[in-house]
Image (tube, coloured by chain):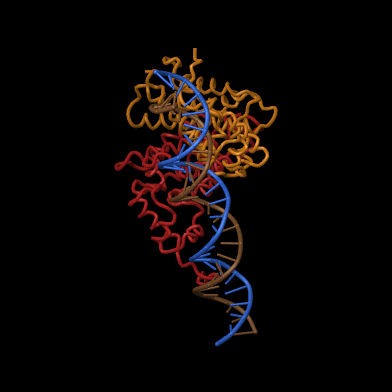
Chain colours: A orange, B red, C brown, D blue
Amino acid sequence: MSDSRPPGRPQASSRAMLEEAAAELFLEQTYAGTTIGDIARRAGVSRNTFFNYFSAKSDLLWVDVDAGLAVLPATLADCDRAAPVTESVRQALLRVAAGFGPGRVPWALTQYELMATSSELEASALARFLVQVGLVHEYVGARPGQAALADLAGRAFSTAVVAAAVAAAREWAAAGVGRGELAGYVDVAISPVCAGFHPVLDRVQDS
Amino acid sequence: MSDSRPPGRPQASSRAMLEEAAAELFLEQTYAGTTIGDIARRAGVSRNTFFNYFSAKSDLLWVDVDAGLAVLPATLADCDRAAPVTESVRQALLRVAAGFGPGRVPWALTQYELMATSSELEASALARFLVQVGLVHEYVGARPGQAALADLAGRAFSTAVVAAAVAAAREWAAAGVGRGELAGYVDVAISPVCAGFHPVLDRVQDS
DNA sequence: CATGTTTTTGTACTGAGTCCAATAATGCCA
DNA sequence: TGGCATTATTGGACTCAGTACAAAAACATG
C-alpha cells in the first residue's frame, strides 16, 4: 500500500534519533548545559538539521506531553453535547489525563524543578498551556452563550480549569515514585473548578 | 532625613529614562522590532547599563504590572484569618485589581495581541504568573491543612484562581476603550473558582 | 542521463544575555 | 589637597538560540 516512497531525498536522520540523543545529554549534563550543537553532534547530524525536526530546543522537553495532549480536540469533539459544558470538559480532561500512566512522566515536568528558571522552558510551557486553553475555550464558546459577560466567564473557566489540571500534573510529577495515576490528581484539582462554574455557565439549560 | 547620599558613584541614568525610551520605541517600531541596543542608545547610555537596571528586555513590558502586583503580599497578610481562605484570597485579589483603573492599561497586555508569540514575552508572563501563584499558595498553605490531598487542592486553587484573574485581565485589556474597572472583570472570573473550592478547602471550619 | 523534488549541510548573520576588567564619579578621611 | 573605598558606567569579547539562504546530496521518474 504505502510502499511507494515519496519523491526526493529520503530522511536520513529521524526525529527519534535526535530525541534519544537529547535524552542522554539531558541526563549527563542538564538541559541548560546542553547546546543544540551537542545534540546534533551526538545524533550525527548537522546543527541545521535539528531545526528541520524541531522549531526550538525546548520542544524536546515536551515530546511526551505534546503526544499525550494531542488527543484533546478529538476527545472534546465527541462529548455529549446535551450534558453540561463543565461536565463535558471535566470528562474530556480526565480522559486525556488517563493517557499518562505512572510509568510515563514527561521530561518537562521532572526537569522543571531542577533547573530553576530557564526562560525558554517557561515560554514553551506557557505556549502549550495557552493552546489547551484555546481548545477548551473554543469548545465552551461553541454553545450559544450570552454576549460579553458569559464570554468572560467562559474564558475564565477555560483558563482556570486547564490551570488546575497543570497544577495537578506538577504535583503528580513531584510526587516521585509511588505516584499513582495522573487522572486521580487531575480529578481532585479540576472538579471544584467545574463545580464552581456550573451554575454560571450552565444556567441556560436549567431554566 | 534621607539626604545622606549612599557612597560611591551616583546613578547617572535612571530606570525611568530607559523605560521612557523603550516606551517610545515600542510605539514607533514594535517590541520585537526594537533591540536593547536601540533602547540604550536612545536613553543615551551603554548597552551594558541597560542590564544594570533590567535583567531582561521583557521586563520593560511589565513595569506597570509589577508595580501593581507588588501589593499582593501585604494585602494577603492583613486579611481576616478567621474568614474562609477562599474568601480572603478573593478579597485580596479584588483589592489588587482595584489598583488598575480604566486609564491605566499595562504594556504587556496591550502588546500581547499584537505580536503573536514572542517567546520572551511568554516566558516573562509565566514567570510572573508563577510568582503570584506562589504567593497565594503560601497564604493558603499557612492554614493547618491536612497532608497530601489538601495540598493538591490548595495548589490547584491557588493556580486556578490566579489563572482566572489573568484571564480577566486579558479580557479587560482586549475590551478597548470603554472598558470599566478591572476589578469588575476579576470578580466575575474568580468568584466561581472560590465558590467551587470553598467546600473543599474550608470544610475544616464548618465541622 | 537529464530533471524535479526533498533532505541535508555550510556559511553567515542578528540579537539576547553573561562575564570581566578598566574607568569614572562620588563621599570620606587624613 | 591627596589617597581610598565604594559604586556606576563602559567597552570588549564571548556563548548560544534562532533565522536566512544557497549549494550539494540522494532519491524517483522519464
Q: Residue B181 at what x, y percent from top left?
A: 36, 43
Indicate the quadrant containing the C terminus of chain B: top left, top right, bottom left or bottom right. top right
In the displayed structure, does residue B116 sit left or right of residue B136?
left
Q: Residue C12 at what x, y percent from top left?
A: 46, 49
Q: Is residue B83 something that shows in the picture?
A: no
Considering every residue shown, the one lying at the far right of the view is: A178
Is residue B108 or residue A66 the one in the foreground? A66
Q: Residue B83 at what x, y percent from top left?
A: 54, 38
Q: Is residue B111 something that shows in the picture?
A: yes
Considering every residue shown, the one lying at the far left of the view is: B178
Counting every numbered tag in the picture gives: 0
Q: Quadrant of residue B43?
A: bottom left
Which residue sits at x=40%, y=30%? A153
Is residue B119 or residue A164 the one in the foreground? B119
Which residue sits at x=66%, y=42%? A29
In the displayed structure, does residue A95 sit left or right of residue C1?
right
Q: Residue A184 at what x, y percent from top left?
A: 60, 23
Residue A56, placed above or below residue B15: above
In the displayed structure, does residue B170 sit left or right of residue B202?
left
Q: Quadrant of residue B158?
A: top right
Is residue B56 or residue A38 the one in the foreground? A38
